[in-house]
Image (cartoon, rainbow, N blue to C red):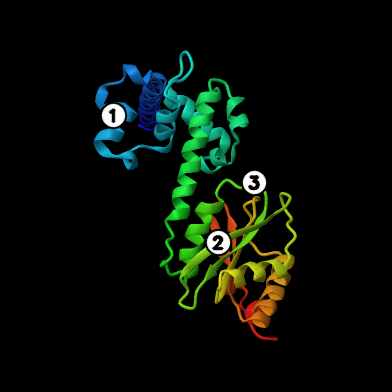
């Protein structure tokens, strides 16, 4: 009985393997099928029109921009490979037009289309914070800043100026440094904030490495700016560190930095 059971299990596993191979082959065939040869209802552009862009995967949205693939490879397969090698959409957003152009099958026109679409997305995200938008919660400010700093490959520092009711006035991208260091002049921060007639500011900088923990330098800089703000009557409400899609609030994680000496 034990021998028979083992043989049945082997046969069952062989059957499963045949199914997996068949499904894999079919999936590969679908990826490499030219978009023009797909059923109309399955083509990304037609699905975008009928169901909206949110119904498409990231690879399908990229395929709409690429339009065509290489011989033997569909635009969807090219898009999936690009996403995989870049580490996802965030990685693609960090690529320059020249980097995209160097990829097989992506020339100047396709690289320009992808870069232009990503840049439009960033600009839309920036205008989504109108002058009456309240930024009294770090989550709201972080959402705006994650979109604003997406794709930055160097460390940048700036601040968002707010009125007495914590409403958005302006944002300032003041300094850009090397990949892991930027020098900040506190006097320039508060000069710009005073010109905005700001009552408070939210400081921000990014970590291109993706590490969202605050460094000793980050904490020391924040403490200096908190003191400087008190001297000129401008409250430093928070300091947000943006690390790709993630972020952290220094006020939440290091409240002692914002306390009076």
> Where residue 171 is drawn, which disc sits there?
2
Residue 173 place in picture, x, y as percent: 61, 57
Residue 16 place in picture, x, y as percent: 37, 28
> Where residue 119 is drawn, which disc sits there?
none
> What is the C-alpha distance between the residues marked 1 and 3?
35 Å
Farthest front residue in view = 195
> What is the C-alpha distance between the residues marked 2 and 1?
39 Å
Report the mark closest to the observer, 2 or 1. 2
Assess whether mark 3 and mark 1 are in contact (beta carbons under 8 angstroms). no
Label 1 secondary element: helix
Assess whether mark 1 and mark 2 are in contact (beta carbons under 8 angstroms). no
Residue shown at 46%/14% (left/top)? Answer: 72
Location of the C terminus (image quadrant)? bottom right
> What is the C-alpha distance between the residues marked 3 and 2?
19 Å
Residue 159 place in picture, x, y as percent: 59, 64
Looking at the image, residue 145 sits to the left or right of residue 230; the answer is: left
Q: 88 or 251, which lies in front? A: 251
Looking at the image, residue 260 sits to the left or right of residue 40; the answer is: right
Q: Which residue is mark 3?
A: 153
First in sequence, mark 2 or 1: give its number.
Answer: 1
Tell me if residue 250 can be seen. no
First in sequence, mark 1 or 3: give its number.
Answer: 1
Residue shown at 38%/18% (left/top)? Answer: 34
Farthest top residue in view = 71
Location of the N terminus (image quadrant)? top left
Q: Which residue is mark 1?
A: 46
Residue shown at 24%/35% (left/top)? Answer: 50
């Amino acid at each position: 009985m034990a021998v028979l059971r083992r043989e049945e299990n082997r046969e069952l596993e062989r059957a499963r393997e045949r199914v997996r191979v068949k499904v894999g082959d079919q999936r590969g065939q679908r990826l490499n099928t030219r978009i023009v040869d797909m059923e109309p209802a399955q083509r990304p552009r037609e699905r975008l029109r009928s169901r909206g862009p949110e119904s498409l995967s990231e690879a399908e949205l990229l395929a709409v921009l690429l339009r065509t693939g290489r011989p033997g490879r569909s635009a969807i397969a090219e898009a999936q490979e690009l996403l995989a090698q870049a580490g996802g959409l965030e990685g693609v957003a960090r690529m320059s037009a020249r980097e995209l152009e160097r990829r097989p099958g992506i020339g100047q026109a396709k690289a320009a289309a992808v870069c232009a679409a990503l840049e439009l997305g960033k600009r839309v995200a920036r205008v989504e914070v109108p002058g009456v938008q309240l930024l009294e919660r770090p989550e709201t400010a972080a959402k705006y800043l994650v979109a604003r700093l997406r794709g930055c490959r160097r460390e940048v520092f700036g601040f968002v100026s707010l009125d007495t009711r914590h409403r958005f006035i302006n944002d300032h991208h003041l300094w850009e440094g090397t990949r892991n260091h930027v020098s900040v002049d506190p006097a320039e921060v508060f000069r710009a904030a005073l010109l905005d007639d700001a009552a408070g500011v939210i400081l921000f900088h990014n970590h291109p490495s993706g590490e969202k923990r605050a460094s000793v330098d980050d904490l020391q800089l924040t403490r200096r700016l908190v003191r400087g703000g008190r001297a000129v009557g401008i409250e430093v409400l928070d300091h947000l560190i943006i690390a790709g899609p993630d972020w952290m609030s220094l006020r939440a994680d290091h409240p002692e930095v914002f306390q009076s000496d």
